Amino acid sequence: MNDILQGLISAGWLIITFDPDLIEIVLRSLQVTVGAVVVSSVIGLPLGAWLAVNRFRFRRFVIALMNALMGLPPVVVGLIVYLFLSRSGPLGVLNLLFTPSAMVIAQTIIITPLIASIAHQAIRELWAEYHDLLISVSTSHRQRICTLLWDGRRALLTASLAGFGRAIGEVGAILIVGGNIDHVTRVLTTAIALETSKGNFSLALALGFVLIALAILINATVHSLSQTERSGRW
Amino acid sequence: MVETALFPLTLSEATVRKSGVTLVGPVDLEIGPIGTTVVIGPNGAGKSTLLRLMHGLDRAAKGRVDWNVPMKDAQNRQGFVFQTPILMRRSVVDCIAYPLLVHGVSRKDAHAQALDWADRVGLADHAARPARTLSGGERQKMALARALIRNPDILFLDEPCASLDGSATREIEGILKSARTANTRMVMATHDMGQAKRLADDVLFIYRGNVHEHSTAEAFFKAPQTPEAQAFLRGDILE
């Protein structure tokens, strides 16, 4: 209990004093997570819509596989990305290992199935609603997907935020491919893991509270800006 | 460039099946370029399915549905109003403008035309509102404006006034009469015999998926030829 209280006080102090190390870690966490969410959304949202609109052989299998991949173990993803990006790996020439880019790649692999699955679910319902109209006005395939993505944007925002939630709290994969190098690849979660291993529980907790506050703040801001609560009217 | 005539629409032995059950057909029918055809029949007779078949929303499992032009061109020259209006998650004016936007009209022109149509159907004051906040009658007027905005050669209407009150029905019928004046061919399914008498030039009586009678409205309502149509007009319950 004392550790928690101490952690809260430390978190408040770090924030009030604009601790430069904390700011750096927070910014890097945001850089990596937002980067991964953007890339995953660009891939996952149209993929979810495409799967909702198209009928093809093995479609059910692909959807089941995508849903199953939502539970990808981050450590395994980290290991595979590590092997690909290591000097002896097929992508070793890119020199990405132990860089924020490698962390973005790992997180993208982890959250893309999550974003695509939620998007697929949302778009499937919208497609059932719009189907006759979009066929009736002779829309092209691309127009159907664009229309569904646009009109379903509020639900899709939730899909991206779910991806953000998973990515910002992820530690296993980015620890392996990032290496938790101070001033280079250290982010909030890896810093928490490090401080905990050092027995510095109050600082670890302080960083944890900052992480939670950051996740809530980002979600609240996005919801507020996009007026999600008014979506029922639309 | 002179546009090739869309009509006649010809159904030859056209049959719709779903899950092994024949819903409509085989139907042989020809729809010409002029007038309003009203499709009547008891619940489940296949009125909506017949309209969907003509419009291309349902495919013929057997037989053919042919227009005088290729199917893709034909679909571009049709409109369809559903019994329950499909409301997009957009404003009224954006919903009305949608068919123009997907056919390459600029956003500015589409918006201007949609505002004009919103005004024509009495929704000018609601143009900026989310479509989902409209009342039942307003929703159907918006759907009509959306179907008419591209000046279709033919408009299919699937019970557009079902569950609407008298004044909303009168307004919808007013819009339909204006469309007819503008030479829009209409094929409408309805349960409302009064409406059928007010709007129909010819009547298609459909029962158990088959067209039992196709005659002028005057002839049909005066002296229906088939026992089923006679029973239907008497108000008997047809199973």
Image (spheres, helix red, strand yellow):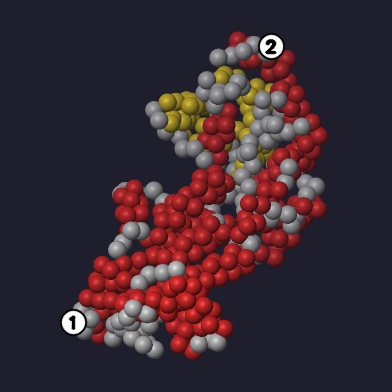
In this rendering, the answer to whether A4 lies above or below A139 is below
The quadrant of the rendering that contains the C terminus of chain B is top right
Q: Nearer the viewer, residue A151 or A198?
A: A198
Amino acid under label 1? Ser
| Residue name at image x 21 percent, y 84 percent | A87
The residue beneath circle 2 is: B234
| Residue name at image x 61 percent, y 59 percent | A228
Q: Nearer the viewer, residue A130 or A202?
A: A202
Q: Taking the image as drawn, is residue B1 in sight?
A: no
Residue A163 place in picture, x, y as percent: 44, 65
Relative placement, left or right, of A113 versus B99 is left
Image quadrant where residue A31 sits: bottom left
Q: Nearer the viewer, residue B79 or B160?
A: B160
The residue beneath circle 1 is: A88
Q: Nearer the viewer, residue B83 or A46?
A: A46
In this rendering, the answer to whether B219 lies above or below B117 is above
